[in-house]
Image (cartoon, grey):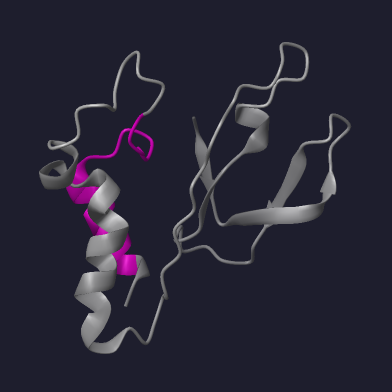
């Protein structure tokens, strides 16, 4: 499932009833959202889908900044994911990914967005 960055959900919907995304005004790529047009196909049906959103402050985390970064990174952390055996092919569940980025690239993005 592809995500897009620096967009937010508008109050409008398209002709199929899917939410429309509009520019957020940010260009930091710190806001990522799953684009409904990438998974909701009215001609073939809507899959059962659960998307979780996790928010973190972009500033003023103070002494807790590393803990906040750690929580946001945990779905990508192999130290966490290696202990989970019910997620993967044929289970109906999967871990998050960001366009094939490596764990180091994801951590760098998080570090740049959460200060």
Query: Which portion, as a residue range, is magenta?
Result: 94-112
Left/right of residue 77 with respect to residue 93 in the rendered view = left
- 30 lies above or below 32: below
Q: In the rendered view, tell whether residue 113 sits above or below residue 37.
A: below
Residue at 61% from the left image edge and 26% from the top image edge: 39
Answer left or right for 108 relative to 52: left
The quadrant holding residue 68 is: bottom left
103 with respect to 114 (left or right): left
14 in magenta: no
Would you say residue 109 sits in the magenta stretch? yes
Q: Position of residue 23 (x, y in %)?
A: 67, 57
Query: Residue 44: percent from the left, percent from the top?
Result: 72, 11
**Going by the picture, which residue comes out furthest to the front?**
86
Where 72 falls versus 81 (above or below)?
A: below
The mark tally for this picture is: 0
Residue 79, position in %: x, y? 10, 45
Which residue sits at x=17%, y=49%?
104
Which quarter of the image is occupied by the C terminus?
A: bottom left
**Quarter assignment of residue 86:** top left
Residue at (31% x, 33% y) in the render: 100
Residue found at x 76% / y 45% = 20
Q: Is residue 68 above or below residue 37?
A: below
Which of 27/99 is in front? 99
> Percent x, y for residue 21?
70, 48
Instruction: In this rendered view, identify the residue nearer to me: 37 or 95.
Output: 95
User: Which residue ends up furthest to the right in the rendered image?
Assistant: 15
């Amino acid at each position: 499932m592809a995500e897009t960055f620096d967009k937010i959900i508008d109050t409008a919907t398209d002709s199929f009833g899917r939410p429309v995304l509009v520019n957020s005004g940010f260009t930091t790529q710190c806001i990522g959202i799953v684009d409904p047009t990438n998974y909701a196909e009215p001609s073939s049906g809507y899959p059962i889908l659960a998307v979780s959103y996790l928010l973190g402050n972009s500033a003023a985390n103070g002494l807790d900044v590393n803990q906040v970064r750690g929580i946001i990174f945990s779905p990508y952390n192999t130290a966490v994911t290696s202990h989970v055996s019910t997620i993967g092919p044929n289970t109906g569940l999967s871990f998050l990914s960001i366009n094939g980025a490596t764990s180091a690239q994801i951590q760098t993005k998080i570090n740049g967005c959460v200060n």
